């Protein structure tokens, strides 16, 4: 066994320079917390492929997996799902003095695929997870979802949140 608990023992692969191996792993993914809201991976686990290529002085690494994160829409708070395809690459050349050639996921010949997968997931996560691309959000006056509200029927007597009255009167130079 070359991998245990999301850790791959690169030395046990016994690769010579120029050789490569593809490893199929099942990884547990942690939820992403954004603005106090949790976005959880579907099933919590994914099947991932790790390609390990031996170079003359280290390793070239590639991680691939697909998942879907579910959580609230940032505009209307309805359920939202984001499908993500992860394809991440790392290089580890331990004899190099260049930090760009040293992977933070390799320590003493062990590759922490679990940590790498979670970091790659965070980097691929959308800035604003939405329930749909044209999400209209919530009404600023009553808080009703505007996605399914009839614009003609959804009207208010007052002009919005009274705490914002001073801001509405603010004139900005352009």
Image (cartoon, rainbow, N blue to C red):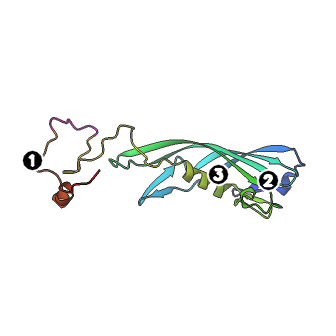
> Camera-side residue: 163 or 84?
163
Q: Is residue 92 above or below residue 67?
A: below
Tell me if I can see residue 1 in this picture: no
Residue 2: image tag: 2
Residue drawn at x 55%, y 53% is 122
Q: Is residue 171 left or right of residue 23?
A: left
Residue that mark 1 sits on: 157
Q: Secondary structure at mark 3?
A: strand
Q: Is residue 119 left or right of residue 162?
A: right
Q: Magenta residues?
A: 147-153
The residue furthest right is 16
> Camera-side residue: 44 or 38?
38
Q: Is residue 95 left or right of residue 166?
A: right
Residue drawn at x 45%, y 43% is 81
Residue drawn at x 40%, y 44% is 130
Q: Does 150 appear in magenta?
A: yes
């Amino acid at each position: 066994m070359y991998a245990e608990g999301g850790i791959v023992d690169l030395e046990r692969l016994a690769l010579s320079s120029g050789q490569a191996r593809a490893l199929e792993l099942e990884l547990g993914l942690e939820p992403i917390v954004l603005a106090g809201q949790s976005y959880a991976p579907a099933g919590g686990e994914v099947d991932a492929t790790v390609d390990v290529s031996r170079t003359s002085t280290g390793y070239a690494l590639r991680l691939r997996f697909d998942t879907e994160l579910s959580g609230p829409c940032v505009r209307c708070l309805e359920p939202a799902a984001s499908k993500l395809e992860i394809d991440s690459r790392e290089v580890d050349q331990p004899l190099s003095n260049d930090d760009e050639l040293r992977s933070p996921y390799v320590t003493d010949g062990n590759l922490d695929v679990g940590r790498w997968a979670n970091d790659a997931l965070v980097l691929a996560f959308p800035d604003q997870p939405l329930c749909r691309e044209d999400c209209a959000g919530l009404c600023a006056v009553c808080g009703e979802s505007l996605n399914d509200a009839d614009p003609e029927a959804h009207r208010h007597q007052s002009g919005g949140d009274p705490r914002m009255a001073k801001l509405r009167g603010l004139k900005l130079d352009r």
